[in-house]
Image (tube, rainbow, N blue to C red):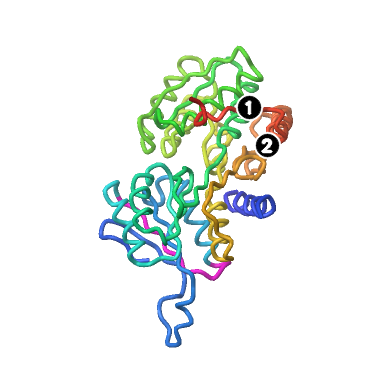
Amino acid sequence: MKKTWSILLTLALSVGLLAGCGGNNDSTDNGTATGGTDGSQDKKKRIALVLPEKIGVNPFFALMDEGIQRAANDFDVEVKTIESTDPASIEQNLRTAVAEKYDLIITSTFQMEDALRKIAPENPDVPFAIIDTVVELPNVRSVVFREHEAAYLLGAAAGLATQTDKVGNVVADDIPIMHKYMTGFAEGAKSVNPDVEILVNFVGGFTDPAKAKELAILQNSKGADFVAGLSAVGDLGIFEAAKENGFYSSGQDTDNTGIDPDHVVLAQLKGADAVVYETVKDFSENNYTFDIRDYGLKEGGVGLTYVTHESETPLNPFIGQEIVDQLKVISEDIISGKIKVTNALEQN
């Protein structure tokens, strides 16, 4: 389903909108601009993707790598993905990409903000992009998602499906970005079920399945029959808890319902691969601008399985087609502006 989601999202965005590394990192190359006697290969545009973590831990970063590799093939550019092995290597890897004179440097998430705010002003002629957060500098494009819109749909699904009027959120950390998810989820759930109680616990990080599992079990013991995984890698622990204890759960970013269709019944989607692809496309076609790009339900940048995007996994009866049909109406109302979902980052 991941490839289907990627292709669908890229099409939606296209219609809706218009390499070396430091010693403490790993990198992968795609492209043939590594030599040549006539120098023609040197004319290829060179683009680096600098990630704050290693690929294979958080699926969000794996999606970004998929997007840039696909763009390399489609737009005949040379790309390199540089994976940071620890927080100390983040700034070093960004500086290495600058030193190796990449034409565009793409990075991602709040983990990269401090390094980018330091390095971009030092290199005003180097174009940068950052995905999933905003850094307002004259040589940086910021790409963000309206996750709160998809979270509203997820919350509405939980509010409609729960048999106990208690649902849970196991959240990575108590930081501003995660409140976009929590606030949207709560608004959606309360909009369809005013009596629903939402249990919230914080894992304290994005890579702790054991702690996330413990918190999901705790929430289930308090009556939650649905626990939304909002903890990145920690979601794997939530899925284990759901299977072992017989409750329902959902994941993030990619369609992970196939992991356990009996218990993982929904996935809140975020198209990191497609927005990286679109960023490379703009740059390769000389349409690159330094601004803030915002992707929500309308642009196909976020979504919910079965509602905005199809899934290869059969719909679980806990959700059911009747609820999906209601959610599709809610989605259209968000897109039209009839329903206004609060963006927690814009609250004072």
Residue beneath the point at 54% across and 46% down = 292
**In this picture, is 7 found above or below 160?**
below
Residue beneath the point at 41% across and 35% down = 234
Kindly identify which residue carries mark 1. Answer: 157
**In this picture, is 272 found above or below 28?**
above
**In this picture, is 147 found above or below 54?**
above
Mark 1 touches mark 2? (CB < 8 Å)? yes
Q: Where residue 307 is drawn, which disc sits there?
A: 2
- Give the residue furthest to the top: 195
Residue 110: x and y in percent read 40, 41
Q: Which of marks 1 and 2 is nearer the N terminus?
A: 1
Q: Where residue 2 is drawn, which disc sits there?
A: none
Q: Residues within 10 Å of mark 2 (few under 14, many from 20)?
A: many
- Disc 1 is placed on an element classified as helix
Residue 336: x and y in percent read 72, 34
Distance from the alpha carbon under mark 1 to that under mark 2 = 10 Å
Q: How crowded is mark 1: few (under 14 residues within 10 Å), some or many (20 or more)?
A: many
Q: Does the magenta stretch include residue 128?
A: no
* 165 with respect to 25 (left or right): right
What's the amino acid at mark 1? Answer: Ala
Residue beneath the point at 52% across and 43% down = 144
Q: Does the magenta stretch include residue 81?
A: yes
- Disc 2 is placed on an element classified as loop
What's the amino acid at mark 2? Answer: Val
Q: Bounds of the magenta span?
A: 73-85
**Residue 282 position by quadrant:** bottom right
Residue 59: x and y in percent read 46, 46
Residue 326: x and y in percent read 72, 28
Name the foreground residue: 223 vs 191.
191
